[in-house]
Image: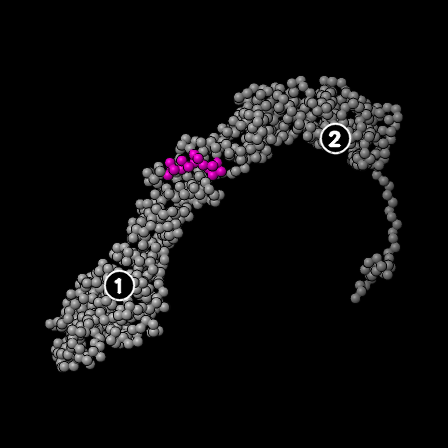
Amino acid sequence: MNGNEFASLYYTDCTPGQGLRGGAGFQFQSVSEGVTHETMNLVQRTSLYEAPVPWMRERRPVNQYPPSLTHHYDGVYVTARGIYLGAEANGSREGNQFTHALATTSAEPYGLTRPAQLWAADWWSERPAATTRCDPVEGEPEPGPLGVDVLREWVLGRPDPEGWLLALVSALDRLDGPDRRRVVFVGEEPADILSWIAAGTLLLPQERALRVGFRVYATNPQYTAQDVLGVHPDWAGPIASPSRDSGAVVFNLRTGERSEVEPSDAAMWWVPRFLRDDPYDVMDAVELAHQVARGGRAEAADLLAAGAVLLDESVDATAAATLARWLGDRPQLSTEDTVDPLVRLVLRAPADVTTLRACDEALIEHPTSAVHDDLRVVLMRSEMDTALSSAGALPKPPPRPWAPPQERTATEAFEEVADRARPESFDKLLRLASAYGLRPRADRFRAGMHRFIQWWADHPGQSFDLDAWPCGPLALDLLRDELTRRMQSDETRENAEKAIQNRFWRLLRASSTDPTSPLDSVVTAAIVAAEPRSRRELTTSAVRAAKERFSQPQSSEMAWRALNLFTLPALEELHDFLRRFTGGTHGPLVREGVYRVCERALGRSDDLLDVLNLLAEFGDGGERPAQPRLATLHAHDMSLRAWLSDTGRLPDLDGLDTAVLVARVEGVVQKLLTGGNLRQAAAVVSSLYAPVPARMLDVLRRRWSSTAPGQHREEAVALSVIAMLSDCPDKITDQISQELVAWVRARSQSTVDEVTRLLSPAADGEDKATVMAAWGRIREAAKPKNRTKPAKKDKPEPQQRRRFGLPSWGRGEPKGD
């Protein structure tokens, strides 16, 4: 019973030696090879012909007894046809019958035939076999007259065909569920009942249809194992009325009445199509819906998909969305038979971008799809429409090579849309083209690209990832051209430079290789302003490029613009810059920048020396700084530096700017100590005014406290004594006095005497007495003091020690407890 054939079993009243048991009586007369006792018991229990007892009592003619057809499943499929024979083989009693049963453990022998269609097939046996071994029945046997087309036409010929078939299929559809109800047909003609059963089971998948058990006729419905029963009106009794609550769904073919049944989803879907379309296509669709269903029962999406594939039904936008999601949930589907046909239907529908995206994702699992490229063309068009009309983000489709024709179509579609697109949407369009692996030709959407570049230059705050564009390098080149053009106009230059400083420098820095060009110089200046640590490196490259292309003063002007357009250098950075351009003059741009740096540093005395050095070294073409204070500082510094370098006479110190003296104090001290005329040096020191003496004292202290050779320590001490008597704060004077006392204390007498010798001629008149008195006080303070031994204090009494917080026991006294 496991092959593609049915086992055959004959059951009837046998004469002695005719049946399997050998004796007389009802028994299996003949079976095919391999039939087990379990199968015989199942057939005997569920599928034998049932003769109606009332008719036997009436001794009705045999030809009035209708044949029966039963079907049952309990691990084994059993379909059986029976006829009434009348008197028993061994006597005159009524009740003899002959049942021919088919049995199989597999659904395969049925093919696509429903068991009810086997009614009245001409291969059924109606008489015993010659021996107890009969032949099996080949699989997929010819059905009787109830073919598919015949059944559809027969149903259409009944009153309210769709309503009755809808109620029947709904009832059959629920037989394996929790709300199952038995189905009862009441009618005189078994062919009519079996036609309805056959038609109803055609709209169930074969697997479920084969498990719908039926018996036509059932003489004892309450004791019948099957769920679908055919009952003759003569013995139906109260069950024949649909209005009575018998717990069954009743179809009374005599009266035309039926029970009300809530339609199932599957019945509502398939019944109208069975009555309207090709019934064979509908049956195939039923099978497909069952195959793709999860959990064994088709859901609405399964029904939709199966109907769409096999009935070639058009779908609306809602159905298309359902199908797209359904495809994504079932990657195991056949690409050619199911997936591609459904995608084609979606493409013909008014599907939105979400639906098309879902289809595209579903086709990832189907690399052999013949429609994926067509889908991606439609999807890309829809994505472009979305990009042009909304601000939503675009998903990135999976990378996949195009077929050449579709790639050409998609590229041309993109170029057409991009040429007329709004600039605000251009980024999304370009990213979309890259995501789809397209390489559009920029000359095909030149107008759109031009509008976008102009808009981009006007909106530098927009941030784009050029690596995500198929034409990123070209777009960058066009942006450079646009910014360069704008910098050539007085009306647009300032805004263009601000745009580069605020945003574009990051984008342009990699392509900016010539810091002397109009655009690259602005980019370089923006980098210096944003990243101060890069100044030194960029100074080197900018100066080198400027010197290679231009001569002074144009070279320094070009380098200055490239470095300092947006921010001025610090003093040390300015010094480094000017040092790179020695031996020539500078133009007005550099001179004005230097003056601004110097003006900014005027209030910082610690930086002023650098400022003055810069001013002294700065080749200004004979011009003087426009700022009055800078001009004064410059002139005074030049005069003082001439004296310090032995090229000029001693300037009028009273007339020099204090800042110049403070800045040059190191040089002044060196000049005074090494000039060989301490008297003149003393006169200079005495003429100084705050804050010069204080600064000078600090320099002198470092000289006489140093151990290095050539410091002129004694001369430095002598000038320190004189400087202390100048306009110097008391706090500094006191501090220097203490340090000089320590210095004297640590030196030999001869060294101290040398200072005295130097001081004596250094001061004249009243100043001499003052100076020598001050030096005398320092020497006196440096002498050791006579110290007497302090008187021994009495040791405090214990009471006093306790009062002072000391222990109560003293030396030699016992400790307390």
Report x, y in % for residue 347: 35, 46
Q: Looking at the image, what colour scheme do you see?
A: one colour
Q: Which residues are magenta?
A: 410-427
Nearest the camera: 49 or 540? Answer: 49
Residue type (three-letter) at the residue carrying disc 2 = Val
Q: Which residue is mark 2?
A: 699
Nearest the camera: 676 or 767? Answer: 767
Nearest the camera: 713 or 769? Answer: 769
- Look at the image and say whether residue 564 sits in the magenta stretch: no
Residue 422 as seen in the image, left or right of residue 649: left
| Residue 249 sits above or below residue 640 on the image | below
Q: Which residue is mark 1?
A: 158
Residue 166 in view, yes or no: yes
Report x, y in % for residue 799: 86, 61
Name which residue lies at 44% across and 31% down.
447
Q: CA distance from mark 2 to mark 1?
A: 127 Å
Give SS at disc 1: loop
Task: Please identify the quarter of the rendering in which residue 591 is found.
Answer: top right
Q: Residues within 10 Å of mark 1 (few under 14, many from 20)?
A: few
Q: Main secondary structure of the magenta part?
A: helix
